[in-house]
Structure formats: C-alpha cells, structure tokens
Image (tube, coloured by chain):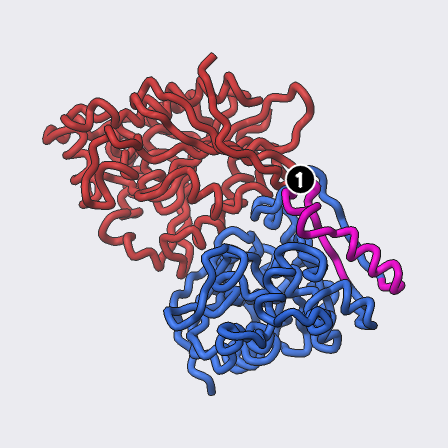
Chain colours: A red, B blue
C-alpha cells in the first residue's frame, strides 16, 4: 500500500476535507493533493469528481475558494484536487508564471530538463487514481473530471483520451487548443519539443479532430474573461465539436471573469451535472 | 459624499463582489472592506448582513472562503466584511498575532499608543454604515450582524449595544467574555487600561448581566475547536442568557474546528436565518 501522509483534516459540510502528501513515482517528488469525502454510509463507495487547477495554483485554491463542498455533500460525491506540477528544490523551474512549477499542463514532458519530473499526465491518469482507490471510499467505475483554464485543458484532454474512465467531463474557462494560443505554444514547445504532431494528444480540439469523442461535455466560459480572445478561444472547441458531430453544451456566462468568483458561481451546477451522470 | 475607491469588482453568483477603500475619519487611516450586492430590481433597497472577522484576518478571508454568496443571492441580502484593525506604517503594532494590527477587537482604544488609530467601534458602528448607505442599495433599517471568534465577540457586543439597529445577531465560535479569557484580558487591558469596569461594554456576558438584551441570537460552536475551553468558553454565554431569561440558540456542532471549513459549513444557514428576520 502506498504511504499517505495526512497534512490536515477538517470536518466540513458534514464530511471531511483533507490534504494529503505522498512520494510520487511519476514525478519523483513529494506531491500534495486534497480530497473531500462527504458523509456516507459505512462501507459505501462514492463517485468521484476530479478538479484540475489552473496556472500558478496548487490544490489549495479550489479547496479554499471553490465552494464545492455543499454540493458534494448533497450529492454524495468525493472531490479530488491535485497539484498543478511537481514541486521542490530539485525541480527545474522558469521565471515566468506560465511555465515550470505551477504550470505542468498535465503532460508527460519529453524535453530536458523537464522530462525527469514533469510527468503530470501519468500522475493524474494512473498514479493518483490508484492511491485514491487504496485510501478513500471511491467507486473507481464512477469518475467525472473538471478543471479551470490550464486545468480545463487538462480535464478535456484527459477525458478525451480516457472516455471509458470518465463518464462526464466539464470545464471552466478551459484552454481548448494549446496548438493555437501563446500559453500552449510556450508550454508544449518547452515540455514536448518542436514537433507539433506530438502535441495533438494534448490539445482538445486536435483530439476531437483525430477521432476522440465524449458523451457528456459541459463548458462554462465568462464573457468578461480577459484571456478569452487571446488564450482560451472557446469558439475553436465549438467548431471542432460541430464538425465532429459531438454534443457539447457551451455556456457563455455574461460578465463573468477568469477568477474563482466565476468558478464558485457555477461549481454547484457542475457537481450536480456530474452527479446525475455518475449515478449507479 | 465620502469618496470610495473601487479596488476590484467581480461578477459572482449573479451579483457583484467588490472590494473598496476609503480614508476613514474614525481610524485616521485608509480602510478596506468588501461588499457583495446580489442581483436586484433597479431602485430596490436590500437588507444587509455584517460579518466581523477574527484575529489575523482582513476582509479577504471571509470574502474568499466564507461561501456566503449563493445564500445571499438566494435571499437578496447584501454582505459586508470590514477589516479587523487599522493598517499602515503609522499604525502602532505588536509582535503577537492577538494584539495590534489584525486584532482591533472592535473597541475604541483609550490607551496610548493605540487611542489615535484603534477606533474600530466607531468605525463599524457609525462611519461604515453611513458609507454603505451612501454608496450601496442598502435598507439601513434592516441590518443583521454576525462574525467569527474575535469578530463573533464584535457581533455580539455591537448587537447588544445597538438592539434597535440590528434585528438579528449571530456568531460563529465567538469570544463570549473577554473579561474571562487570555485573548480578552490582553487586548482590553492593552487598549482600555486596567480598569475592568470599563471593559464591560465590550463583553457580551457583562452586557447581558448589565441589562442589554437581544431578541434573536444564534451561535454555532464546533466541539473540536482548540480554543473552546481556553478562550471562547461558550458556556458562559449560555449561563448569562439563562440567568437573564434571554432567548438564545447555541448549537454545539460535533467535530468542527475553528477554521473557515467550519464557518462555511453553516454560513448558508446563518444567512437564511438573518434573512428570515430581515424581511420587510
């Protein structure tokens, strides 16, 4: 059994909000994540909703500001928030906020010096689910995934690559096509090298173009988001889905920005939407 | 009209979460506070709920972690969160977390060097309400007040001294009797001097003993709160209310600690409880 260190636990909304740390075989570092387990019957296994965070964030941002616990308690859903990159003195970094620590982009890096530690794809897709199944009352057959901005990109791409694992995928203000925005070009170029064909498995629009499909996809995007035109480009996702004949619900939310004030406004709806699709 | 500087505004839960700054005549410093205004009909005046924060906090803690906006939007209640002390280089401070900046205890200090700036009673009782009435769609005849820990002490004492102004008073893990706990003895001794008779108007239990009454009082207190026995002493409030024949609902919440994970668990209930008493 993989060892798990309890960093903190708090009773909240009749359940337990915890923060945990473990040595990761994927990243070769310690990794910290948070889990909310709602009140449940002894022995019950609950569906789980993953939340992948955006640039500069750790598990803490959504844990403190996400306003998900009331809805998770109501619907009996476990909520998991991983970190956005490996951390530690041995881990290479970049001075910019959008590359290196806090900006793992949920890829397995192939370029040096990133390849050794920046293996967030493997961490989120394989290692952390196994740890969850070992230590928490998770029904691993009922998983949904969501995320914000870079984490919305993570949720979309991980969901699209693993449609059998995730019954439901949603996102808040996601980067929908790293191939077509400055954040994406910098990060995927840095982590994966100049061959843009290799980036396609990390680009939601390209994955859809190449044949990946989701049954259930919900996206909320604020119209007052400063990154909408330059980085997020929601319309590219709408176009890719339309071209592929893939159903998607994209809601342009008037006046909302890129902050947790936006995320928290629609979090309860997302939790309910996932819960509906993760029943039994 | 007193000038008000907008620090930030975000659309949230269909309303507007703002942070504002102004020059305070009470404290002689700039003061920052947050206000959430829910969606409302043009020209409508809404009831207002005050939240006074605890030691070390600013307006930001409850604004980010309090989970009040959904309930305030549902009930049409404005939510105001002041700072806990004056700030700035000219303001005297103490090295400890429980005295000086971040620890104003909602008193008007009489002792030096505190008396010049530490006038949080006047600020919260008189100056900020007038600013709110000028700049926000507040129905000043419908006010409720709540708070946490030191801010619970603030809510109780300000409420008890102004029963005509606040129709409803509640608190999360309040310091119920500064006369009888180390935090209170240090702060009131420091700000008000050694004459303990002068502390009584800043002590909820003493105010009740001296004849102040509230019509509606709700208190939530976690049983897993590390400060319960040494500082908060909820039983003293229960005893004072019983002796005075004053109705109070004190709920001991099993397993909850002193954190915002506790506050946010019961915030929606408090907002709804106040809203019920602030109708029309």
**Residue A158 visible somewhere in the drawing:** yes
- Outermost residue, top direction? A1
B194, A122: nearer the viewer: B194
- Outermost residue, bottom direction? B1
Image quadrant containing the C terminus of chain B: bottom right
**Residue at image point 66% right, 51% down:** B231
Residue B183, above or below B105: above
Instruction: Confirm whether the magenta stretch covers residue B227.
Output: yes
**Residue at image point 14% right, 26% down:** A112
- Range of residues picked out in magenta: B217-246
**Residue at image point 11% right, 28% down:** A195
A150, B120: nearer the viewer: B120
Indicate the position of residue B196 as horizontal and vertical percent values: 70, 69
Instruction: Confirm whether the magenta stretch covers residue B219.
Output: yes
Chain at tag 1: B
Residue identified by numbered label 1: B224
């Amino acid at each position: 059994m993989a060892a798990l260190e309890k960093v903190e636990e708090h009773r909240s909304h009749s359940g337990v909000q915890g923060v945990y740390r473990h040595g990761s075989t994927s990243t070769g570092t310690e990794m910290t994540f948070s889990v909310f387990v709602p009140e449940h019957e002894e022995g019950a296994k609950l569906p789980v909703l993953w939340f992948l965070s955006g640039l500069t964030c750790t598990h803490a941002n959504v844990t403190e500001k996400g306003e998900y616990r009331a809805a998770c308690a109501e619907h009996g859903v476990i909520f998991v928030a991983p970190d956005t990159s490996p951390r530690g003195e041995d881990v290479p970094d970049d001075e910019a906020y959008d590359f290196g620590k806090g900006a793992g982009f949920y890829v397995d890096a192939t370029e040096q010096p990133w390849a050794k530690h920046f293996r967030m794809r493997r961490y989120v897709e394989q290692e952390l689910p196994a740890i969850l199944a070992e230590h928490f009352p998770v029904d691993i057959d009922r998983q949904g995934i969501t995320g914000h901005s870079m984490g919305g990109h993570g949720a979309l791409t991980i969901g699209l690559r693993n449609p059998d694992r995730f019954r439901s995928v949603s996102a808040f203000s996601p980067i929908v096509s790293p191939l077509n925005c400055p954040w994406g070009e910098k990060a995927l170029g840095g982590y994966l090298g100049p061959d843009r064909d290799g980036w396609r498995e990390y680009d939601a629009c390209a994955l859809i173009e190449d044949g990946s499909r989701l049954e259930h996809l919900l996206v909320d995007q604020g119209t007052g988001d400063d990154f909408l035109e330059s980085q997020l480009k929601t319309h590219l996702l709408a176009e890719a889905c339309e071209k592929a004949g893939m159903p998607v619900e994209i809601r342009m939310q008037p006046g909302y920005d890129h902050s947790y004030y936006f995320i928290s406004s629609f979090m309860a709806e997302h939790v309910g939407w996932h819960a509906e699709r993760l029943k039994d």
